[in-house]
Image (cartoon, helix red, strand yellow):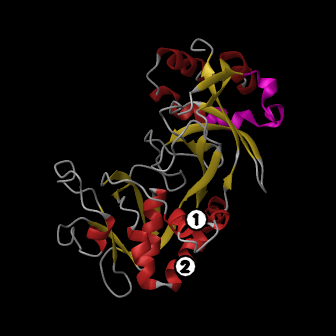
Amino acid sequence: MAYLTYKRLDFDDLNGWAADDLSAAFSVFSTTCADIVDPDWKHLCHLAQAGPDPRQFFETEFRPVLIEDGAPTLFTGYFEPELLGARQQGGDYQCPIYALPDDLSSRKPYYTRRQIEQDQALAGKGLELAWLADPVDAFFLHVQGSGRIRLSDGDVIRLGFAGKNGRAYTSVGKVLADRGVVAADGISAAVIRDWVWAHPDAGRALLWENQSYVFFRVLNEISPDDGPLGAMNRSITPDRSIAVDPAFTPLGAPVWIEKYGADPINRLMIAQDTGSAINGAQRADIFFGTGDAAGQKAGSIKDGGRMVVLFPKGLV
């Protein structure tokens, strides 16, 4: 097992640091910094609320730290889906989206994805928040953890993460790669979707390989113009918010990312979210926004690079 290492860096060591618009990251940092309980962070949040120059603030009050656990860096992307649906079951709309069951904490382990979908283990309990036409849409809504459902009358139901069944998350893309169906470097949300559509029975069985199941709640408290709620219960921001592993990166911390690949990114982000598949010191999921265009961007990201956490100088 690899040892966890911490390496202090200078801002000059960060590729592209001088060119980034730090005011954008400063604005995002200011929305969540008050939720960090550590006194050193509280002090910095107080300074931020005084409206300092963003670059001077970050360079004076923080120190970049590279945290590594031996695993390679991996950046992926996520987004907030916008799907067509209905409030009531009927016609094409036969795939329920469920609220958090009352007996979830008392049943360990809880029903699997297959038991909920095939055996209808939760049917008749009054937990249905909305109905979708496509089980693949429902599956990827679970993967993303939030979404918007547009109804035929123009209304929108906004859904946020409420909890999950406690089962382990399994990447169905990796399952396809392990079976030799698709090359490992060719896996994407679009490839998975197309394969499931082309193989209805085998496709549903593939989705059931991921036993993890997500429950939702209706979000009435946030503006339609704001992003979905992250793990800090605050709206996240496209291109400036990331999901991280909080075992290594404090939620609310600024994180400098250097993403390689076809569309490189050198940018200061804020760690405002988590995810079942986000594990490791050099692992992050970049939030790209809402809708199909954001989904296409998010689905194409699977790149290496480097992520560097900015810690208060008093801590390092």
Crowding at mark 2 (Cα within 10 Å: few <14, some 14-19, many 20+): some
Q: Is residue 268 above or below residue 141?
A: above
Q: Nearer the viewer, residue 231 or 108?
A: 108
Residue 282 in picture, x, y percent from top left: 61, 38
Magenta segment boundaries in residue numbering: 9-27
Which amino acid lies under the numbered mark 2 shown in the image of this protein? Trp
Residue 78 vs residue 35: left or right?
right
Q: Is residue 68 visible?
A: yes
Q: Which residue is mark 1?
A: 291
Which amino acid lies under the numbered mark 1 shown in the image of this protein? Gly
Q: Nearer the viewer, residue 224 or 59?
A: 59
Residue 284 in picture, x, y percent from top left: 59, 44
Q: Is residue 121 above or below residue 312?
A: below
Q: Secondary structure at mark 1?
A: loop
Q: Which residue is mark 2?
A: 195
Q: Secondary structure at mark 2?
A: helix
Q: Is residue 117 magenta?
A: no
Q: Residue at x 48, y 26 (%)?
A: 34
Q: Nearer the viewer, mark 2 or mark 1?
A: 2
Crowding at mark 1 (Cα within 10 Å: few <14, some 14-19, many 20+): some
Residue 40 vs residue 67: left or right?
left
